[in-house]
C-alpha cells in the first residue's frame, strides 16, 4: 500500500489541532476514522509518528521530520491542482546566457502591468533548449536554432555581434573590430549554448577554438587575455565585467533571437509573449 494524501492530511491535522477529536472536526470525519488513518500511515512507514498521553498528543522525533515532508508534498499537490484547474498561474521563460539584455526589465514591467495574474520567472538554464527539454521552462529564449523537431520557434528580433576581450588587449583601444582582426586569435566558445562558433569565419580564416562551460567561465577566461569571444548584444548589456572590453564586430551578421516552445503542448501565453517581444525588439 502506498502512502496516501489523506493520510498525510490526517497527520498534519492532528499535529496542528492538538488532539484526535479536534482533528476529526477539522477534517469532517469521525475520531475513529482519524485513529485508523494514522495507524495505517504508521504501519506503512514502519515508525511511530505521534506520542500520545492523557494530556497531549505530540510528534516523535521521526514524526517531526515526516510532518515537515508532508507539508511540502501537500503544498506541491495543491499548487498542481490550482494550476491544472484555474489555468497557468506562472510563466517560466528559460534562457542560457543573457535573457533579453537591455530589454529584460522592460519586458518584466510590461508583463506585470498587463498580466498580474500570471507570475513571470526568467530562469538562466545552461542547456541547448534553455530548460524546455528538461521541463524546467515553459518557453525559451535562444540565440541559436534548435534542430529538435519536438520544438517550434519564431524569431522575435536581431542583436548585433560584439567581441569580448581583455582590457589589456592591444585591440581594446579600438572603437570596433572586423572578423579578420580575430582570425589569428583563440576563440572561446560554448558549443552547447553559445551564439557564435568558428563557422562565422570563412573556411580558410577560422580561428582556433577553446571550449568554455557557461557565461561566468567564458568571461573569467577572456579576462586573462588568453582568448577572445564573440557574442550577442544582450551579453554586453547584462554582463559588464571589470577587465573585459566589448567592441562591435562591424562585418558580422546579426544574431537572431528566438522564442521556442513545445510543438505539441504550447503554453497559452505564447502569442502574447511573441507580440510583446517582437514589439520591444522593433522599438
Image (cartoon, rainbow, N blue to C red):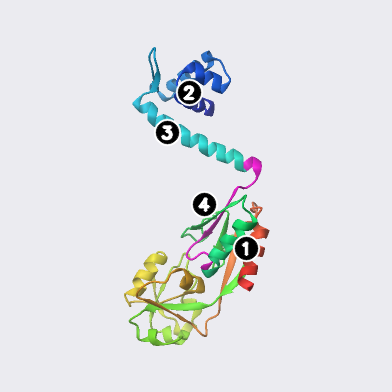
Alpha carbons under labels 2 and 1: distance apart? 52 Å
What range is drawn magenta here? 84-101
**Mark nearer the viewer, 4 or 2:** 2
Residue 217 sits above or below residue 269 on the image? below
Residue under label 1: 153
Q: Which mark is residue 17?
A: 2
**Relative depth, front residue between 12 and 266:** 12
Q: Is residue 89 visible?
A: yes
Q: Is residue 77 left or right of residue 267?
A: left
Alpha carbons under labels 4 and 2: distance apart? 37 Å
Neighbor class of circle 4 (other Cα within 10 Å; few <14, some 14-19, many 20+) is: some
Q: Secondary structure at mark 1?
A: strand
**Mark nearer the viewer, 2 or 1:** 2
Name the N-terminal-most of marks 4 and 2. Answer: 2
Q: Secondary structure at mark 4?
A: loop
Alpha carbons under labels 4 and 1: distance apart? 17 Å
Q: Is residue 35 left or right of residue 171?
A: right
Name the N-terminal-most of marks 3 and 4. Answer: 3
Neighbor class of circle 2 (other Cα within 10 Å; few <14, some 14-19, many 20+) is: some
State the image coordinates of residue 280 (x, y, percent, origin top left). Answer: 62, 69
Q: Is 93 colored magenta in this rendering?
A: yes
Alpha carbons under labels 3 and 1: distance apart? 41 Å
Q: Secondary structure at mark 2?
A: helix
**Mark nearer the viewer, 3 or 4:** 3
Name the N-terminal-most of marks 4 and 1. Answer: 4
Residue under label 3: 68
Neighbor class of circle 1 (other Cα within 10 Å; few <14, some 14-19, many 20+) is: some
Q: Residue at coordinates 45% horizontally, 21% vertically from top-left?
A: 18
Residue under label 4: 136
Name the N-terminal-most of marks 2 and 1. Answer: 2
State the image coordinates of residue 198 (x, y, percent, origin top left). Answer: 46, 77
Amino acid at each position: 500500500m502506498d502512502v496516501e494524501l489523506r493520510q498525510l492530511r490526517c497527520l498534519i491535522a492532528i499535529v496542528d489541532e492538538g488532539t484526535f477529536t479536534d482533528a476529526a472536526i477539522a477534517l469532517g470525519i469521525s475520531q475513529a476514522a482519524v485513529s485508523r488513518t494514522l495507524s495505517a500511515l504508521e504501519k506503512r512507514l514502519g515508525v511511530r509518528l505521534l506520542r500520545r498521553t492523557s494530556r497531549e498528543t505530540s510528534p516523535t522525533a521521526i514524526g517531526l521530520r515526516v510532518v515537515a515532508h508532508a507539508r511540502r508534498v501537500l503544498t506541491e499537490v495543491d499548487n498542481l491542482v490550482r494550476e491544472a484547474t484555474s489555468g497557468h498561474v506562472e510563466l517560466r521563460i528559460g534562457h542560457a546566457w543573457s535573457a533579453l539584455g537591455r530589454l529584460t526589465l522592460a519586458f518584466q514591467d510590461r508583463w506585470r502591468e498587463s498580466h498580474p495574474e500570471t507570475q513571470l520567472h526568467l530562469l538562466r538554464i545552461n542547456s541547448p533548449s534553455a530548460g524546455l527539454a528538461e521541463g524546467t521552462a515553459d518557453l525559451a529564449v535562444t540565440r541559436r536554432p534548435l534542430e529538435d523537431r519536438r520544438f517550434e520557434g519564431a524569431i522575435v528580433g536581431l542583436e548585433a555581434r560584439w567581441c569580448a576581450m581583455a582590457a589589456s588587449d592591444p585591440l581594446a583601444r579600438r572603437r570596433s573590430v572586423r572578423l579578420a582582426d580575430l582570425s589569428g586569435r583563440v576563440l572561446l566558445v560554448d558549443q552547447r549554448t553559445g551564439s557564435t562558433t568558428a563557422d562565422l569565419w570563412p573556411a580558410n580564416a577560422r580561428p582556433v577554438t577553446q571550449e568554455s562551460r557557461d557565461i561566468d567561465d567564458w568571461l573569467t577566461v577572456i579576462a586573462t587575455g588568453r582568448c577572445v569571444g564573440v557574442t550577442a548584444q544582450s551579453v554586453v548589456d547584462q554582463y559588464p565585467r571589470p577587465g573585459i572590453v566589448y567592441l562591435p564586430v562591424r562585418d558580422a551578421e546579426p544574431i537572431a533571437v528566438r522564442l521556442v516552445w513545445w510543438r505539441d503542448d504550447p503554453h497559452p501565453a505564447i502569442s502574447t509573449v511573441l507580440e510583446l517581444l517582437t514589439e520591444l525588439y522593433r522599438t
